[in-house]
Image: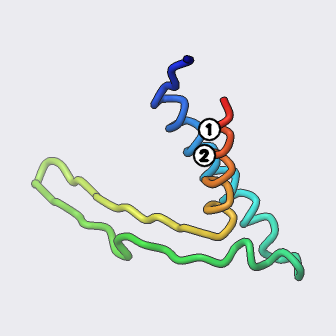
């Protein structure tokens, strides 16, 4: 039995999210495919700023989940399953 790597799953999931987000952005203006860009953003609206006098650190995180990225994740999991 062949052992599957967790790194391969992580790489496939990340590529599915990125490609799905890219496809969602590209199809946002297409009338029949605009639903692929439907989604929600989560995270910090305004970044947190920590001013230490000499050093200023800015923290921020925002995640946008779209229908296309969800489809990309599902395809990535299916690809991983059949490897």
- The image position of residue 73, as x and y in percent, is 61, 53
Indicate the quadrant containing the C terminus: top left, top right, bottom left or bottom right.
top right
* Crowd band around label 2 with a 10 angstrom C-alpha radius: few (<14), some (14–19), many (20+): some
Q: Nearer the viewer, residue 81 or 25?
A: 81
- The image position of residue 18, as x and y in percent, is 63, 51
Outermost residue to the front: 1
- Image height of 52 relative to 68, above or below: above
Residue at coordinates 61% horizontally, 62% vertically from top-left? 70
Helix, strand or loop under label 2: helix
Going by the image, does 70 lie left or right of 19?
A: left
Helix, strand or loop under label 1: helix
Indicate the quadrant containing the N terminus: top left, top right, bottom left or bottom right.
top right
Q: Dot 2 corresponds to which residue?
A: 77
Going by the image, does 68 lie left or right of 31?
A: left
Going by the image, does 51 lie left or right of 14?
A: left
Outermost residue to the bottom: 31
Q: Nearer the viewer, residue 70 or 15?
A: 70
- Image height of 7 relative to 15, above or below: above
- The image position of residue 32, as x and y in percent, is 89, 79
Cα distance, mark 2 to mark 1?
Answer: 6 Å
Q: Nearer the viewer, residue 18 or 79?
A: 79
- Image height of 1 relative to 56, above or below: above
Question: Pointer 2 and pointer 1: residues touching (CB < 8 Å)?
Answer: yes
**How many circles with numbers are drawn on the protein?**
2
Picture quadrant where residue 34 is located = bottom right
- The image position of residue 81, as x and y in percent, is 62, 38
Q: Dot 1 corresponds to which residue?
A: 81
Q: How is the image coloured?
A: rainbow
């Amino acid at each position: 039995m062949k052992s599957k790597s967790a790194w391969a799953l992580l790489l496939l999931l990340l590529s599915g999210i990125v490609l799905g987000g890219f496809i969602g952005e590209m199809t946002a203006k297409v009338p029949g495919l605009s639903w692929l860009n439907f989604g929600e953003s989560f995270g910090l609206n305004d970044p947190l700023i920590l001013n230490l006098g000499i050093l200023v650190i800015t923290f921020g995180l925002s995640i946008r989940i779209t229908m296309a990225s969800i489809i990309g994740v599902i395809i990535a999991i299916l690809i991983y399953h059949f490897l």
